[in-house]
Image (spheres, rainbow, N blue to C red):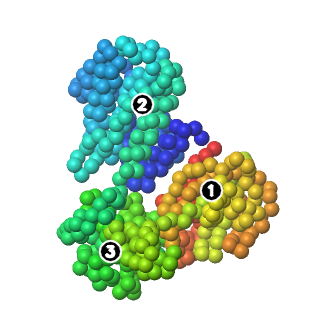
Amino acid sequence: MSARTAAFKAVVDALKARGKTTTVVESTAGGLISSSIMAVEGSSAVYQGGSVAYSTQKCKPVLLNDAELHASLLNASAADAASYKASKRDWTAKTAVAYCEAMGTDYAVAEGGAAGPTFRPKGLDSGFSAIAVAARTPDGIKVVRQTLCESPHARRGDNMERFATAAARELLAAATGDGLDRCAGERDNAKAIAAYASRSDASYVVCDGGKALFEADGKLERLSRADAARFGDVATATFLGTLDGAPLFAVDATLETDDARFRDTRVHGPFLSFSENQVALAATALVTWKRRSGFCSICGGPCTLGSAGHARTCQTCKAVSFPKSDPAMICAVSNRANDKILLARSPRHPEGVMTTLAGFVEAGETFEACVAREVLEETGVRIDEGSVRYLKSQPWPFPQSCMVAFRATADCGQELVLDDELLEARWWDRSAVRRACGVPGAVMSPDVAKEAFDKDPSLELLVPPKKVVARELIEAWLSET
């Protein structure tokens, strides 16, 4: 997978996870941005089309028939290189905002520059592209990312590839920058935290171990300070940050845990919106750490909370500790022909629910070595040397992990020898896995899984729901040819 292909797949995945859309208007990249998005399976859910403004004199119709945008593009023909680049930055900024507004999308990318091999402005002898990303924000549509991608050469085709990849990375940065603002710089400012807590729009998420309080319709319950006090000590609530500008805190349910609204975050979290899932995972992780870190791991002395719930200080030896995440690998292993994938079921999964292999990284071990070791230990399969490839990561605070996702290949003719961590494992073909991906619902719940098999006895397996990294690994494999 090329850098460009990987970048645009990440863009589509990020937009789909957040339920966001985008449009594109490009010039120097010559349609490569749009075609790269459309080449990703499922991109129709996030991409609403775009324009290629190639001929500056004749492209007014594809610039929304906007005379001002067209005039701005025509003015981008300054005599020297510096002013020419500045004019392109100005044009892309205006165009991104205009397209975001006209197309009704959440984001818009505008790109323009010069690819080579010849250049008009004096002093310009290598390619460049100005890239702007506009987004809908609480303050209206505005440019949220802008960069000037400069090339060391004038090779047209190579530069188009370079500029399209840069555009993907800018859009990805814009799309993944939303959600929970953790406000890390304010945690040690007691006055600022108190001010956040006193605001009328402050809300509290309540957690009990791996469970969180949900509303009846499946959304995360966000309580007022007074209502949250029924469940736990709001005075020691952990400051999570802000969401859409409103302060959020996490409360440990030490007083009330029998409320029927408590649901397993592992099972129901993936069905939250992207932002609420961020909040649920952060709250679960921090509340779990708070419960487990009351005493110093060095001397055993009692610890006090600090940094708005993000640090503890030992009262005896004064050692400071922080929340941690244990690294774990998760890997989709396919056969060398790439038409089968190795999936397995552990005792904690409902019958028929198969997933990718996972395991903890040991001390002094690389992730690549962990992938090879865990796959061999759990299934008896030796992966191909050098085949391990990183894809992405996901917080998994059950109780305190971070899943780092990989792809690898192996000879599927090897005998499967399962350890005691697995109940079953086998190589699955694309048709069976694709059918499993079409089953909706919280299939990690035994009742939901049983209902799915009862409804369609021809199903061979179920796979984890969308928005969890195991499912993303499986869908990434399905999209490959």
Q: CA distance from mark 1 to mark 2?
A: 32 Å
> Which image quarter is the C terminus in?
top right
Q: Amino acid at mark 3?
A: Ala
Q: Badge 3, how many Cα within 10 Å: few under 14, some, many 20+? A: many
Q: Amino acid at mark 1?
A: Phe
Q: Is residue 211 left or right of residue 361?
A: left
Q: Amino acid at mark 2?
A: Cys
Q: CB under 8 Å between callouts 1 and 2?
A: no
| Circle 2: element type | strand
Q: CA distance from mark 1 to mark 3?
A: 35 Å
**Residue named by callout 2:** 149
Question: Mark 1 or mark 3: which comes first in sequence?
Answer: 3
User: Residue 461: x percent and y percent?
Assistant: 63, 66
Q: Is residue 45 left or right of residue 398?
A: left
> Which image quarter is the N terminus in?
top right
Q: Is residue 322 visible?
A: yes
Question: Mark 1 or mark 2: which comes first in sequence?
Answer: 2
Q: Is residue 429 left or right of residue 249?
A: right
**Residue named by callout 1:** 367
Circle on res. 237:
3
